[in-house]
Every structure is written in C-alpha cells, then in structure tokens.
Amino acid sequence: MEIPPRLVAKHVASSIVGLFVARAVGNAADRRNLKKDSIPVLLVGTALAFVVAAKLEPVTDKIVDTTFDFVAAKRQAWKNRKSK
C-alpha cells in the first residue's frame, strides 16, 4: 500500500504547526519562571498544539493542495516543452 505524497505533506504541515505552538508554549512558560520540561507545561503545550493544528488544518491543506497543483502544472509544462 502506497501513501500519496500529498497526504504525507498535509500531515507534515500540520505537525510543523503543532511543533511551533508547543515550542511557543514552552518559551512562554520559561518566561513565567516555570520549567520548560515540567509535566504540566508539556501537557498544556501538547494539547494546545493539537487544538491549533486541527483549527488550522483547512488552511494548511489548501496551501499544500495549491503547492502540489502548481508543481504538477510546472512539471507538465516542462514535459510538453521537452517533447516538442
């Protein structure tokens, strides 16, 4: 079974958003004199990362789809130009 590259890219984009949110929560906790690697900070950061990634999923999916369509069009144009 082969996983489509577009689906992989969508999950990667969602994971990147979650990573940045979790890192931002850790940095905010560090400024509040909480340990960045304490259990409550990690739990809140992870939960918030999932929520934000889920809310932004339509936006990130559209970005990935637009990028994939652009690349496919450029490849097709290159193949058409190459075959002439």
Image (cartoon, rainbow, N blue to C red):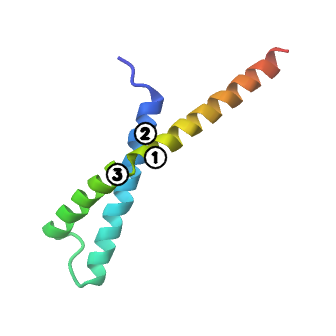
**Could you say which disc has been placed on residue 42 in the image?**
none
Task: Measure how far apart labels 2 and 3 are at the Cα level.
Answer: 14 Å
Q: Amino acid at mark 2?
A: Lys
Q: Amino acid at mark 1?
A: Thr
Q: Secondary structure at mark 1?
A: helix
Q: How packed is label 2: few (under 14 Cα within 10 Å), some, or many (20 or more)?
A: some
Which one is earlier in the sequence, the residue at label 2 or at label 3? 2
Q: Quadrant of residue 20?
A: bottom left
Name the residue rendered at 63%, 28% in the picture.
72
Q: Which residue is mark 2?
A: 10
- Secondary structure beneath label 3: helix
Q: Residue at x 31, y 62 (%)?
A: 22
- Quickly name the residue at label 1: 60
Q: Nearer the viewer, mark 2 or mark 1?
A: 1
Instruction: Provide the residue designation for mark 3.
Output: 55
In which quadrant will I find the N terminus?
top left
Describe residue 27's horizontal placement relative to residue 78 as left or right: left
Mark nearer the N terminus (1 vs 3): 3
